[in-house]
Amino acid sequence: MEKDIFLDIFCFFIGKDRGYVTEILNGGGLHAVIGIVILIERSLVKIEKNNKLGMHDLPTTWVHWQEFAYNYIPDDFYLGNIVVIDLKHSNIEQVWNESKLLWNLKILNLSHSKYLKSTPDFSKSPNLEKLIMKDCPKLSEVHQSIGDLNHLLLINLKDCTSLNNLPKKIYKLKSLKTLILSGCSKIDRLEEDIVQMESLTTLIAKDTAIKEVPYSIIRSKSIGFISLCGYEGLSRDIFPSLI
C-alpha cells in the first residue's frame, strides 16, 4: 500500500495539498492517512508550507516505465534530480510540452516509441551522456540543440526509418564516442564535418541511403570501428580500401 501511495505522490501529486491528495487516494481504495504518515516517517515524503506534499532533495528513482501511456510527460510529473529516464515502448509523441531543467539527466532512452516524432530540446539537459531512441519509426527530427551537449558519449538512432537528415550542429560533438544510424534508410549522407567529432571511436551506419564515405573521416585519429557503405571492420583495415 505504501509503495502505491508513494508512486502516486511521486508521479502526480508533488506540490498538492495533503488533504486533497488524501481524499483522492482514499477514493481509490488506499489508506492514505496512515500511508502518508509512514512515508513521512521513512523520509520518503515531506510536508512543506501550506500543508503541501513534497519530496526530499535527494538524487533520484531512475524512472523506468515501459509502455508509458501518455502522449508526453506531464508538466507536473516530478523529475527532481533525475539521472535516467527510461520510457521504452511508450506512447509518447513528444517528450514534453516545455523544456524542463534536468541538470543531472545522464541517460534518455525512448526506444521503440512508435509515435515519437521529434527529440526534445536539449538546451536544459546540458549533462546528457547517452541518447537512445532505437526503433522510433516516426522520428523525423533531431533538435539542433543536440550540438550543444558537451558531455554526450552515445547517440543510438538505429531503425529510425523516417529520419532523413541530421542537424549540422551534431558534428560539433567533440565528446561523442559512438554514433549508431543503422537502419535509418532515409539518411543519404554524412557531412565532411564529421572529422570534428574528435572522440568518435565507433561509427555504425549500415543499411542507410549513404553511398559515399566522407573522405575526411580518413583523417580521424580516434575512429576505431566503421560499418558504412558496405565496409565494416577496424579502421586500420578499412582506410586503405577507402584511399
Image (cartoon, rainbow, N blue to C red):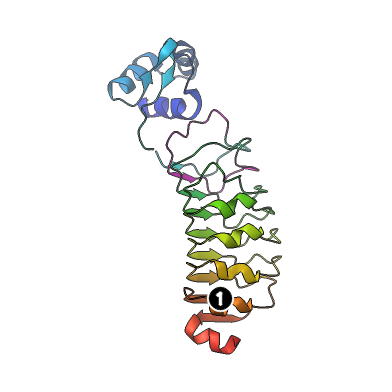
Could you tell me the amino acid type at mark 1? Answer: Ser
Q: Position of residue 42 (x, y in %)?
A: 28, 25
Q: Position of residue 48 (x, y in %)?
A: 40, 16
Quarter-of-image position of residue 170? bottom right
Q: Is residue 76 magenta?
A: yes
Tag 1, which secondary structure? strand
Q: Position of residue 44 (x, y in %)?
A: 34, 27
Q: Quadrant of the N terminus?
A: top left
Residue 111 appears anywhere in the view: no
Q: Nearer the viewer, residue 199 or 121?
A: 199
Q: Write down the residue under mark 1.
A: 227
Q: Nearer the viewer, residue 232 or 150?
A: 150
In this image, 46 relative to 78: left or right?
left
Above or below, 179 against 93 in this view is: below
Could you tell me what secondary structure mostly forms the magenta stretch? loop
Q: Which residues are magenta?
A: 74-95
Above or below, 148 against 183 in this view is: above
The residue shown at (69%, 66%) is 187
Q: Quadrant of the C terminus?
A: bottom right
